[in-house]
Amino acid sequence: MDPPDFGPQLKVKIKERLRASKEGYALGNVGYIVYITEIKDENISRGRIEDSTGQVMYHVTFDAIVFRPFKNEVLDTIVGVSHDQGFFCHAGPLRIFVSRHAMPDDLKDGFDQETSAWVSDDKQVEIKAGCGVRLRLMNVKIEQNEITAVGTINDDYLGLVISMD
């Protein structure tokens, strides 16, 4: 916190800054912080002045709703971009890639360049931007500020859920 922030509303300003800096971001192994539910005044430590900047650092403990994906978890997603190697989809802030090798046999060679869609051999399934797809996470990569995943639709009860016709 900067010196101009000090005053009777200090704890309110600490809470506002914490919400602005943490909500919506990935926090390592914790996952994506969706919403900070509670910050108790007694969980805000006494400040420690940094000699070089004049700012004051506070240690704050809080409760939050988080989204943390796990390997083998089944999610409903929305397709974003389709190309000849597979497609990218999103489940909230999580970006997932589904390779053509992780699709059922009737879709593996069914990419249509004109419509940028994956079409099954019998033309019953068409996966393109905006479609809802149920998938299983095969791998989840957690980095400091981002979580990415690789998924599959090559299992029972997975695949197209909502078509964009």
Image (cartoon, rainbow, N blue to C red):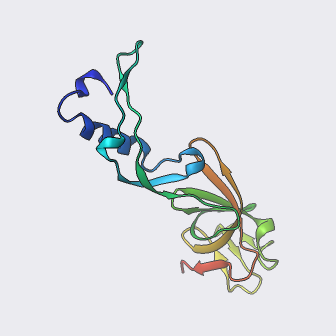
Residue at 35% of width from left, 21% of height from top? 55
Of 153 and 105, the residue lying toward us: 153
Q: In which quarter of the image is residue 132?
A: bottom right
Of 91 and 119, the residue lying toward us: 91
> Residue 156, how many percent across, how many down?
73, 82
Q: Report if residue 83 is visible in the image.
A: no
> Residue 52, how many percent across, how many down?
42, 12
Q: Residue farthest to the top?
A: 52
Image position of 102 with respect to 156: above or below: above
Q: Report if residue 10 is visible in the image.
A: yes
Residue at 35% of width from left, 38% of height from top? 44
Image position of 152 with respect to 32: above or below: below
Of 83 and 146, the residue lying toward us: 146
> Residue 31, how many percent across, how many down?
55, 52
Q: Is residue 137 left or right of residue 146?
A: right
Residue at 67% of width from left, 82% of height from top? 125
Q: Quadrant of residue 158?
A: bottom right
Q: Residue farthest to the left?
A: 8
Residue at 68% of width from left, 83% of height from top? 157
Q: In which quarter of the image is residue 130?
A: bottom right
